[in-house]
Structures are given as C-alpha cells and as structure tokens.
Image (cartoon, rainbow, N blue to C red):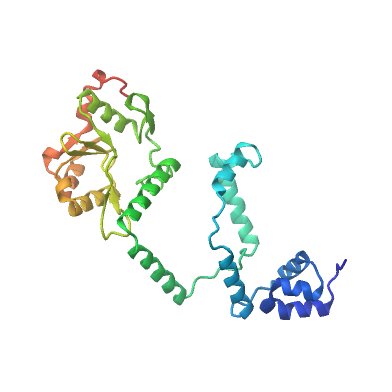
Amino acid sequence: MKNLWKKEEIDWLVANYPTRGKKYCCEYLGRSEGSVRKKSSCLKLKLDINSDFFKEFQLRAGKSKVGKKRPDQSERMKYWNKNGIINQDHLKSEEGRSNLSKRAKEWHINNEHPRGYLGHSHSKETKEKLSESSKKGWEEMTPEKLKNRSEKILQSKIKNGTLNPLKNSTNPYSRTKSGKREDLNNVFFRSKAEANYARFLKFSKVEFKYESKMFIFEGIRRGNVSYTPDFYIEKEDKYIEFKGWLDPGSVTKLKRFKKYFPQEFGKMAFVKQGLSKKDINILIEIGFNYNQIHDYKDIEKIARLILHWEY
C-alpha cells in the first residue's frame, strides 16, 4: 500500500488534476480515491471550470439526476430526532442557538470558507445575470403560484413564530397568546384579543369565517403581494380587520387592498385595540370613514357577559 507521496507524483497531480479530474489521477497513479482526494485537498487543487473535462463532468452529472426525486430529508430528520439517532435539544433553547452561532462565527474567523469564497463578492456581470434571472422568475409567476407562495410563507411564519411587524423582535406575537381555541371549533387565532372578538361575534349570533379569503395584488412582486382580512361575514358580505397595532406593513396592505379591490374595501370594518387619534387619522387617510372604524375597548365593556372571554 502506498502511503508517502513522491515529489514526481505530487508534481504530476498538480499539473493534471485540474484538467483531468480525480478518477483519471487515481488510475494513473495507482492510488485510492481517498488518497488522491486528501492530497488534492491539502494542495488546494480545484477543477478548471474552463476545461473540457469539467464541462463534460457537469453534463454527465446533470443527466444522471433527470427523473430522480430528492429524498424527503425533512421526514428523515424528524424520524432520526424522534428515535434518538440525532439530538437537537440544544437548538430548542435561546442559549443553545446562541452558543451554536458563536461557535460557527469563531470557526469562520479561524478557517477558510468551505468553498474558498470568504471575503469575495460576485462580479458586476454575475450580479446582472442573477438580477435578470430573478426578474424573469417573477414575471413568469402566475396568480395561482403567487397565492400558493404567499400561503406557504404565511403558514411557515405562523408556525415558526416570525410573523412580526414590529422591528427588533423575533416573535411576532410575543406579547399575545396565540393558539387554537376549543370553544371556537379549534380555530387558530394569533392573539387572545382576536379570539375574544370572535367570541363577541358568536355572542352576537353573527356567523363568520376566519381568514377565509386571500386577495392577490396583481403586478406587485415585492413586499406585501397579498392580503387576507381577518373575518368575513358571509351573510352580510362584509370584511372585518382586527389589529392590535397599526404598523407600516399593515398600512401598505390596506392601501393596496383599496387600490386593487375598491369594492371589497368598501365592505370593510376596522377594529383596533387602543384606538388613538393618530390611528384614526391614518385610517381616514387610507380611505376608511368614521362608521367603518371601531374601538375594541367598547367591546371589552361587555366582556363579563361573554362566555370563555380571556383576560
């Protein structure tokens, strides 16, 4: 078995590895794949992307993946974690995630980037190509694809607790109690105030649907591309938006909703916790009239009459 590399072998490897690849070098030198891989890594040898071998290699690799599906890695990870094959408990705490981030940053300070690109940036030409590719992708986005994308993003943010319009906050409803309510058919509400408003509607014998309709803003490809009112009163054909706070993102959504769906906007009522004079002015500027704006505090006055009210 060969162990030590001779100078002639190293010189030959340096001259031929970039243009001929690993397999050819293994056969010529009579060494194992592991031996050639390790030595080429130590010498920091890379394939020449302009060589015929590299182009042919990429073509073969692409053809080999046609018709093959990627394994469901997510399901495998869940299975391994559930059965103790891997343990990710350290990632479930804030301290654990912080320690992991710290170790990763320290590693990158003391080691080269895995692909040798640390400290570099894309060229102007590459950035333009990436930009054109991105624009083309958005231009080909159909309303159906856009709706599915928005729904997936929304559900992921709800699940991960990152749907927060407030700056510098990791949990969108860190001051609220989100979750399913048994007394409301196990529907998921993002806050106890929203759930309480649903109980108020139920107490008032008003049948409603929660987040049942999504409106896509045609032509908008950045930022708020869709809007889903909180409540829909089918019998009255009326929408109700409930807000605990009125952030810039919410204002943008409402303005776009009025612009793209003016008739639907006219059917909307707005309910807010702690309705201030500033809030009223913003809502009037958006296009609401005074009859469409309601204060949640007025509903709280009869809270003691409503079953399962959360305080």
- Total labels: the figure holds 0
Image quadrant of residue 124? bottom left
Give how far across and how far down residue 267 sits, in percent.
15, 42
Q: Is residue 230 above or below residue 16?
A: above
Is residue 302 shown left or right of residue 27?
left
Among the 4 quarters of the image, the one containing residue 132:
bottom left
Image location (x, y in percent) of residue 102: 59, 51
Q: What's the residue at 43%, 41% (across, down)? A: 159
* Residue at the outermost right position: 1
Question: Does residue 200 appear to the left or right of 152 in the view shown?
Answer: left
In x, y percent, where is residue 223? Answer: 32, 56
Q: Is residue 4 above or below residue 148?
A: below
| Residue at the front extreme of this rendering | 67
Q: Is residue 44 left or right of residue 10?
A: left
Tell which of 203 and 236 is nearer to you. 236
- Residue plotted at (20% across, 36% down): 234
Residue in view at x 65 percent, y 62 percent: 111
The residue closer to the viewer here, 110 or 157, is 157
Q: Is residue 43 visible to the viewer in this orientation of the structure?
A: no
In the rendering, at what x and y percent does residue 194 appear? 30, 33
| As drawn, 144 above or below 300 | below
Q: Quadrant of the N terminus?
A: bottom right
- Residue 39 visible in the current orientation: yes
- Looking at the rendering, which quadrant does residue 229 occupy? top left
Please identify the quadrant where the C terminus is shown.
top left
